[in-house]
Amino acid sequence: GENVEQHPSTLSVQEGDSAVIKCTYSDSASNYFPWYKQELGKRPQLIIDIRSNVGEKKDQRIAVTLNKTAKHFSLHITETQPEDSAVYFCAARSYSSASKIIFGSGTRLSIRP
Amino acid sequence: GAGVSQTPSNKVTEKGKYVELRCDPISGHTALYWYRQSLGQGPEFLIYFQGTGAADDSGLPNDRFFAVRPEGSVSTLKIQRTERGDSAVYLCASSLRGQSTDTQYFGPGTRLTVL
């Protein structure tokens, strides 16, 4: 069935450095790839998304890249700040199964001061 | 405007009991989703409503789980004969039309603990 794999499961970076989280998906019909940030005890919140007709998207310090051929997509956070500490989930959604979003297992990002 | 809301925020019950979890989606959103999130995991899809009808219930784990959305707005997730393995955070989300590229907005979740 559909599957999204995410790594690393935990990531610790020095404040000001960059963080990269990588995901792969199995369903070649996937056409929408959102990234959610979830702080402890809070709801997941969308931080950026990318559609399959685009290879890269950037929003201030956050960027996402998509390689459809390899079925890989990645989240890049530059100039990390303490408030970036959270769990990040990648996800994929298929045009053929538009109802459901399949989530990765999450990356716990910690920013060291 | 108001976001997705869920009640209760926490529910503690005993094994074998029946529970109902409520979701109020964003006003005007026709699509509503239920997910279950276990500790250290990503949300897992349960069921999707388009209007009043369950368009996809393939994620419901077994027949103890049922959900309704009788007027196309508020939804209730019902769990019969609860088991300890049902303990998790149950998240509700809504989107404007349910199209594949629509953003899903999540509620704060209901933390269910089955003793």
Image (tube, rainbow, N blue to C red):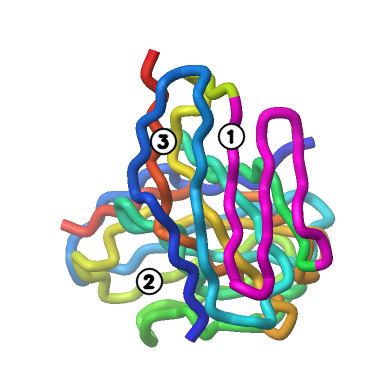
Q: Are marks 2 and 1 on the same chain?
A: no
Residue at point 67%, 53% (across, down): A65
Q: Is residue B42 magenta?
A: no
Residue at point 68%, 60% (across, down): A66
Instruction: From the image, tell me which residue sits under label 3.
Output: A109
Query: Which chain is indicated by disc 3?
Result: A
- Horizontally, residue A54 falls left or right of residue A106, namely right
Calculate the distance from the C-alpha at mark 3 to the C-alpha at mark 1: 11 Å
Q: Secondary structure at mark 1?
A: strand
In the image, residue A108 lies at what x, y percent? 38, 41
Instruction: From the image, tell me which residue sits under label 1.
Output: A77
Query: Which chain is indicated by disc 2?
Result: B
Q: Secondary structure at mark 2?
A: strand
User: What kind of residue is marked 2?
Assistant: Ile
Q: Is A61 placed above or below A65 here?
A: above
Query: Which chain is indicated by disc 1?
Result: A
Picture quadrant where residue B64 is located: bottom left
Q: Are marks 3 and 2 in contact (CB under 8 Å)?
A: no
Residue at point 66%, 75% (across, down): A69
Q: Which residues are magenta?
A: A53-78
